[in-house]
């Protein structure tokens, strides 16, 4: 097994339909083979969001992990989430399986945290309670504090300005405790989150320091799946800070540098945050925003038609309808 299951999951995302069917046959004879199941989870991940047929095919694998691997690190990725609105019956079955595991392992912080990952978007109050319990059960493990911080910022909405600011300050304090104990690749993985949160918490000096560190260390991880996230997030954070200080030309440079990201599993699937592009458009930097959009189209393949529409809209002197992609 690799150190992190993401490697197999990402490989699964590149499978063809024929290859996936062959893996399904193999699983029948090797039901305990984690590599096969992880690859199938990756294959079905994006597809099941839009197609109930794929959701039904993914269901036995996701339930298998809940019932057989409740203490595993696989759940620390978004690939095992089930969206209640899209698949209510599927979610209910997974919920029942997790509640059984919580009852079976009431003092295991890993089980609490893994269950919290499942409930994070659908039942956030339950998720936060589970993470708080994990912190109580194992206070010396900073990982639970990191996950609790994730849940805190996930629960609050930017429209509640004071609450939003306070939530990000709370989260930043938790994140920084973990980051202080992190080095090498793990620190590289965590820096984008800390830099973004520092920006949202109005801790500008710390946001700048983290973003600059991220740009510096990212050169040593060009082949890592997180490299595209690092390049994008660091430049966007620095762009926001430049714009906040009235340095529009510098902010434009950072926007274009963010667009040079090669993409990542997250950027390719969910798309990049477009707040900086929106703010630059408001500053009359139409040409720069168009160039930026042309660049992100290279990795955001599923939205190329939408991006083209945005470019046409901007050339016509109007603002695109892209509010759903303005997240932080």
Image (cartoon, grey):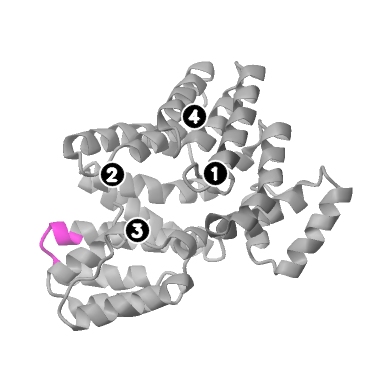
| SS at mark 2 in the image | helix
Indicate which disc, 4 or 2, sits on the residue closer to the N terminus.
Answer: 4
Which residue is at the front of the view, 130 or 84? 84
Indicate which disc, 3 or 2, sits on the residue closer to the N terminus.
Answer: 2
Residue 320, x across and y down, in percent: 24, 70
Residue 17, x across and y down, in percent: 71, 68
Q: On residue 198, which mark appears?
A: 2
Look at discs 4 and 3 and give the one toward the viewer. Answer: 4
Q: Quadrant of residue 317?
A: bottom left
Indicate which disc, 3 or 1, sits on the residue closer to the N terminus.
Answer: 1
In percent of the image, x 43 and y 39: which residue is there?
A: 179
Residue 113 is covered by the magenta coloring? no
Left or right of 114: which side holds 231? left
Q: On residue 81, which mark appears?
A: 1
Look at discs 2 and 1 and give the one toward the viewer. Answer: 1
Residue underneath mark 3:
234
Residue underneath mark 4:
144
Q: CA distance from mark 4 to mark 3?
A: 25 Å
Task: Tell me if residue 279 can be seen.
Answer: yes
| SS at mark 1 in the image | loop
Indicate which disc, 4 or 1, sits on the residue closer to the N terminus.
Answer: 1
Indicate which disc, 4 or 3, sits on the residue closer to the N terminus.
Answer: 4
Look at discs 4 and 1 and give the one toward the viewer. Answer: 1
Q: CA distance from mark 3 to mark 2?
A: 12 Å
Tag 4 and tag 2, C-beta contact below 8 Å: no
| Image: magenta residue range | 242-247
Look at discs 4 and 2 and give the one toward the viewer. Answer: 4
Indicate which disc, 2 or 1, sits on the residue closer to the N terminus.
Answer: 1
Q: CA distance from mark 4 to mark 2?
A: 19 Å
Does residue 224 sit above or below 90 in this rendering?
Answer: below
Does residue 249 sit above or below 121 in this rendering?
Answer: below
Q: CA distance from mark 4 to mark 1?
A: 18 Å
């Amino acid at each position: 097994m690799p150190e992190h299951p993401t490697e197999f999951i990402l490989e699964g995302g590149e499978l063809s339909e024929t290859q996936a069917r062959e893996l399904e046959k193999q699983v029948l004879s090797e039901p305990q083979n984690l590599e096969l199941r992880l690859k199938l989870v990756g294959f079905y991940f994006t597809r099941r969001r839009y197609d109930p047929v794929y959701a039904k095919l993914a269901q036995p694998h996701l339930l298998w992990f809940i019932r057989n691997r409740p203490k595993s690190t696989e759940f620390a990725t978004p690939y095992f989430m089930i969206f209640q609105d899209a698949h209510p019956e599927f979610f209910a079955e997974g919920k029942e399986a997790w509640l059984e595991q919580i009852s079976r392992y009431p003092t295991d912080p890993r089980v609490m945290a893994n269950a919290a990952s499942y409930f994070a978007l659908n039942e956030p109050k339950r998720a936060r309670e589970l993470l708080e319990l994990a912190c109580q059960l194992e206070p010396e493990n900073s990982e639970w504090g990191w996950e609790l911080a994730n849940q805190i910022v996930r629960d609050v909405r930017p429209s509640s300005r004071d609450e939003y600011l306070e939530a990000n300050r709370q989260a930043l304090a938790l994140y920084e405790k973990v980051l202080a104990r992190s080095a090498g690749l793990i620190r590289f993985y965590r820096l984008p989150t800390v830099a973004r949160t520092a920006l949202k918490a109005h801790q500008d000096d710390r946001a700048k320091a983290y973003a600059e560190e991220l740009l510096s260390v990212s050169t040593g991880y060009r082949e890592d799946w997180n490299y595209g996230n690092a390049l994008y997030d660091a430049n966007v954070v620095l762009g926001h800070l430049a714009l906040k200080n009235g340095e529009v030309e510098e902010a434009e440079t950072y926007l274009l540098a963010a667009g040079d990201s090669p993409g990542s599993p997250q950027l390719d699937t969910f798309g990049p945050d477009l707040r900086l592009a929106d703010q630059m458009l408001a500053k009359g930097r139409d040409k720069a925003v168009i160039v930026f959009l042309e660049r992100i189209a290279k990795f955001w393949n599923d939205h190329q038609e939408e991006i083209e529409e945005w470019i046409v809209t901007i050339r016509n002197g109007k603002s695109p309808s892209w509010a759903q992609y303005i997240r932080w």
